[in-house]
Image: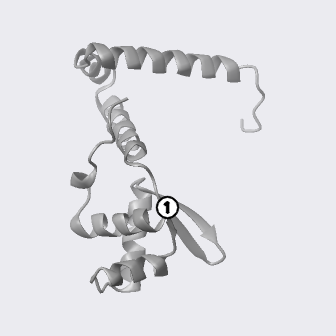
Amino acid sequence: MSEEPDISQTLGDLERQVFEAVRAGGVVSVADAVESLHGDGRLLAYTTVMTVLTRLWQKGFLLRRRQGKAYLYEARSKGQIAGLQGERVARDALARYGDFALTGFVRTLSAGQRRLLAELLLEANAAQAGSAGEENDVP
């Protein structure tokens, strides 16, 4: 695969600053992010940072897990984020335009991208075939 994409254009200024504070801190609480931002000269309210972290998590930029009554946040890699955004765009286009969107997408692929797509389809088919014999608890 290619190098990590630049996701900075998909975030507003405040979102980007909060995202970078989380990335620099590893796994952080809201208070940790506020402290990091204050150290960088951004005097933001706790509730503002909490809102931005929640939005970044909802958009798929952050992972979140509960610890006691609080949440801890961790940044996804730029490649993971780009993949999630690509999935969202593709799902929306397919829902709206169906097979026409898929046909248009495939026609735009380079030879290398078509090879990657073929590999991904083979992996998906193998995974689906492997899970066909398993029982699920969910109806």
Residue 119 horizontal side relative to residue 68, left or right: left
In the rendered image, the vertical position of residue 130 relative to residue 43, given as above or below: above
Q: Nearer the viewer, residue 88 or 75?
A: 75
In the rendered image, the vertical position of residue 51 relative to residue 56, given as above or below: below
Give me the residue at 53% from left, 62% from top: 64
Q: Position of residue 78 (x, y in %)?
A: 37, 48
Residue 98 horizontal side relative to residue 22, left or right: left
Q: Position of residue 51 (x, y in %)?
A: 39, 73
Give me the residue at 27% from left, 22% from top: 105
Q: Position of residue 21 (x, y in %)?
A: 38, 69
- Mark 1 — residue? 74
Q: Label 1 amino acid?
A: Glu
Q: Nearer the viewer, residue 13 or 99?
A: 13
Q: Quadrant of residue 108?
A: top left
Give me the residue at 24% from left, 15% from top: 107
Q: Nearer the viewer, residue 57 or 103?
A: 57
In the rendered image, the vertical position of residue 84 relative to residue 125, given as above or below: below
Name the image colouring: one colour
In the rendered image, the vertical position of residue 63 relative to residue 92, given as above or below: below
